[in-house]
């Protein structure tokens, strides 16, 4: 699986071994793979949805948290960049 990632996402959440961020389409991607420096490897990411451990409520809360974090980053003057899905 290969991917072209233009830039790392401005906002992502880390919960345990998972790192979660919005993809450019609005899907939530999750990766549990990291490079030698601990940077998330988005080329190995998969779609995160309500079937995960938190169920529908957990998924809804992830969306709220990512929305809030992106909004906060925007208010701070950052350009919000989202990760591109692996191809």
Image (cartoon, grey):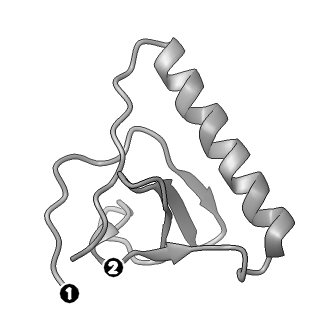
Q: Residue furthest right?
A: 57
In percent of width and height, residue 56 lies at 81, 70
**Position of 55 relative to 39 (above/below):** below
Do tag 2 and tag 1 residues touch (Cβ < 8 Å)? Answer: yes
Task: Provide residue 37's location: percent of width, then percent of height.
Answer: 31, 62
Q: Is 38 drawn above or below residue 62 in the view shown?
A: below
Q: Is residue 6 left or right of residue 53?
A: left
- Left or right: 14, with 41 as reference point: right
Q: Which structural element holds mark 2?
A: helix
Few, some or many residues within 10 Å of mark 2 (<14, 14–19, 20+): some
Q: Quadrant of residue 84?
A: bottom left
Q: Earlier in the sequence, mark 2 or mark 1?
A: 1
Quarter of the picture holding the N terminus: bottom left
Q: Which residue is mark 1?
A: 1
In this figure, which residue is indicated by the disc labeled 2?
44
* Residue 4 lies in quadrant: bottom left
Q: Is residue 83 above or below residue 73?
A: below
Q: Position of residue 66 (x, y in %)?
A: 61, 44
Q: Residue at x 66, y 33 (%)?
A: 68
């Amino acid at each position: 699986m290969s991917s072209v990632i233009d830039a790392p996402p401005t906002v992502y959440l880390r919960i345990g071994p998972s790192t979660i961020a919005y993809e450019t389409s609005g899907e939530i991607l999750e990766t549990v793979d990291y490079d030698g420096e601990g940077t998330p490897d988005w080329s190995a990411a998969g779609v995160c949805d309500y079937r995960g451990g938190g169920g529908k409520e957990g998924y809804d809360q992830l969306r709220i948290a990512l929305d809030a974090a992106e909004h906060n980053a925007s208010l701070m003057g950052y350009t919000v960049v989202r990760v591109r899905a692996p191809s």
